[in-house]
Amino acid sequence: MTRSDFPEKWHDLFAGYALGNLTPAEQAELAQLLQAIPDLQQTLREYEAALAQLPQALDPQVPGSDLEERILQAVQPSPASPTPAPELAAVPLFSRPYWWALGGAITAGIWLFLGVDNLRLRQAVTTQTQALKSAQQDLTLANDTIQDLQQQQDQAETVLTSLRNSQKAVYALEGTGDLATAAGSVVTLAGESKAILVAHNLPPLPADQVYRFWADVETAEALMYCGEFTPQDNEPIQWSLPSVACTAPAAQVLITIDPVTASTESGGELVMHSLPAPG
Amino acid sequence: MHSKPETLAPDCLQTAADRDLLTAMQQGQVEALREIYRRYERLVYSLACKVLKTPEEAEDLTQEIFLKLWQRPNYNPDRGTLSTYLCLITRSRAIDRLRSQGARYRLVQRWHHTHPDRSKVNPPLEQASLGEQAHRVRAALADLAPAEQEILEIAYYEGLSQSQIAQRLEIPLGTVKTRSRQALKKLRRRLQDLT
């Protein structure tokens, strides 16, 4: 089969992979396809490479002229050990007039002192410069890490503020069926009529599907529809609860996958359910 | 048995293939890194500027990319060209940085640095080679519908999720996927020989 013969669906999968927008089902389909026909890796790389060509069309910008030297200085090997100073020839003090020998010795001493001192200073400067560069690189990395942590802290504080200020019910969740590896916790907040879910391994869904949250509460005969959500990049997910009854402690809560257009009278495929409260 | 270190003569550097420069660089030849830098500084820096918006951050990232290339070259020539590899890691790292910045800081920086004015003229030879490639990519992009071009550039340079793109463009999520994939398929057909 030649490349032009590939089904359009395959090209869709390759493009979706390069763009990072494959659904879990498509990811599985692509994985199977690549396992069956390893040569398709080449076509997949062509899609990635085509996307990576975009910057070629940018108006060229040039960094500061000193950047090249900064980079090259950073990779320069440490200067070799200084060449040992040649041993001084014995000064024939007693073969010359005394004053001449004394003057020569003082001069040689001064030159020796200046030479050694100069060498020591240069070594110290080189060592300090390298240490400074190394420290600057470490500082950049540390700043990146701090910014990441601050962002995570901001998100956590938003959630914690909500948790502190509301009456709440907390449920531990485990995955089932195709999402057996999913796990998480959900909190319903009475004061704010909203729920917060922290979940792991809960994949994004196709555009025409959505996760729905259901609660088994005493006041309702059937499972009560308590809102819907779409996960985003492992961040805590919040959504509004459509009914005050959803904030009451429930015997069990469930999460299903449903078509966006489906009625909320009943749920679709069950993917997560709450665990019995300990004790 | 160890192979003989492949050091390139200084007068060969400018005409050496990327693959040979990388081999020489891995043998510790600093001048090989200098030549690689001169070939790709504009590409890496322009991409960093486009994503990060500030010349200072773009320079910092450019330095990081070339230092990483020197310290831990993970580039495999069998998987694509060096320029493609550099674009992949630069974009990835730039978007990581973008996401790790605070929203307020990012907005302020972008407000003050919408158009970094650091462009200069490329050396003639390199300009001719890169210019041809740039021309091809611009032509391929121009062949896309404006909406396709827009969605591809947002997805590539801004690192937004599909739902964020849908929100920004006020279109359904399904349309984001269909349109961006369609655009990339067209682009790949037009640029197949460059990849």
Image (cartoon, coloured by chain):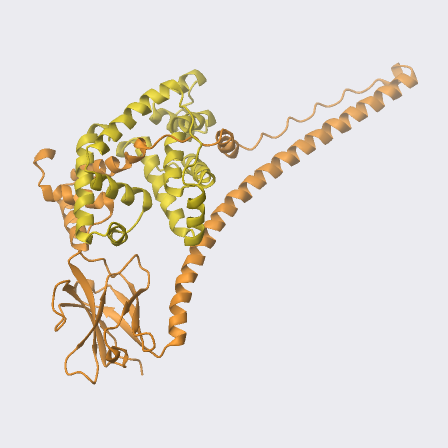
Task: Please tell me which residue is depicted at 35% across the width and 38% down the height of the picture.
Answer: B74
Position of residue A167 measured from the top left corner of the image (x, y, whole percent)? 35, 79
Observer-nearest residue: A261 or A70?
A: A261
Q: In this view, does A207 lie above or below B75?
A: below
x 17%, y 83%: residue: A220
Residue at the image position 65 percent from the left and 33 percent from the top? A123
The vertical placement of A15 against B161, above or below, is above
- Which residue in the rendered view is the most extreme toward the top? A96
Nearer-the-camera pick, B148 or B59: B148
Residue that extends furthest to the right in the rendered view of this protein: A98
Tag count in the figure?
A: 0
B54 horizontally vs A192: left or right: right
In the displayed structure, does residue A270 sit left or right of residue B91? left
Q: Which of B108 and B83 is in front in this view?
A: B108
Can you tell which quarter of the image residue B123 is in? top left
**Residue B16 appears in the figure:** no
Q: Quadrant of residue B187?
A: top left
| The quarter of the displayed image where residue B18 is located | top left
Chain in yellow, by letter, is B
**Which residue: 12% across, 43% down?**
A10
Q: Is residue B17 visible?
A: yes
Check the rendered structure and report the hue given to chain A.
Answer: orange
Q: Position of residue A271 (x, y in %)?
A: 19, 67
Position of the N terminus of chain A by quadrant = top left
Locate residue B106, reporting x and y percent. Answer: 42, 49
In the picture, which quadrant includes the C terminus of chain A? bottom left
Residue A85: image x %, image y %?
Answer: 69, 25
Q: In this view, does A141 lie to the left or right of A191?
A: right
The extreme bottom residue here reads A218
